[in-house]
Amino acid sequence: VQLVESGGGLVQPGGSLRLSCAASGFTISSYYMSWYRQAPGKERELVAGIISSGGKTNYADSVKGRFTISRDNAQNTVYLQMNSLKPDDTAVYYCYARNIYNKAINYWGKGTLVTVSS
């Protein structure tokens, strides 16, 4: 079982990045998927989440209107489109999967670093 994030990197303020989270060893269609982030010296926080069907999403207030979470169950992949990036968005971004039938079954990716700086 594995979640692998990709797409992080260095971007200037105002720029965009698209993160991907590819799952293997399980099928994400039975999982609520979300993105978390952890900035240096801060606690890990929820950024965005999406239900198994993709019909409902939720976002942290700090990213509403700038970030969009989506999923492709056929490709077993979740995405996070990040626009109008700010220095405060600098963090390691983690993908998280929680089984919708048994919340005790959940997985974390190892994270991808996003740095927003001029």
Image (cartoon, rainbow, N blue to C red):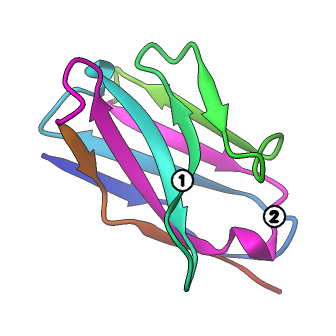
Using residue 15 as the reference point, say whether residue 48 is left or right of it.
left
Q: 36 or 13, which lies in front?
A: 36
Q: Position of residue 43 (x, y in %)?
A: 51, 70
> Closer to the camera, 33 or 27?
33
Report x, y in % for residue 103: 24, 30
Label 2, label 1: how far apart the Cα atoms are = 13 Å
Res. 40 image quadrant? bottom right
Secondary structure under tag 1 reads strand
Query: Relative to 60, does residue 77 appear above or below in the rendering?
Result: above
Residue drawn at (27%, 41%), measured in percent from left and top? 23
Query: Is label 2 in contact with label 1 (beta carbons under 8 Å)?
Result: no
Residue shown at the point (55%, 85%) measured from the top left: 41
Residue depicted at 19% across the width and 50% down the height: 2
* Residue nearer the viewer, 35 or 83: 35
- In the rendering, at what x and y percent does residue 3 appear? 27, 50
The numbered dot on residue 19 is 1
User: Is residue 77 located in the magenta-colored stretch of the structure?
Assistant: yes
- Label 2 belongs to which residue? 15
**Would residue 7 appear left or right of 57 to someone viewing this image?**
left
In the image, residue 20 sits, relative to residue 6, either above or below, namely above
Q: Which amino acid type is marked by label 2?
A: Gly
Residues shaded magenta: 76-104
Within the magenta stretch, is there residue 12?
no
Left or right, 98 with respect to 115, comes to left
Instruction: Measuring from the top left, give residue 98's x and y in whole percent.
Output: 30, 34
Judge the density around disc 2: few (<14), some (14-19), many (≥20) Cα neighbours within 10 Å: some
**Which residue type does callout 1 highlight?**
Leu
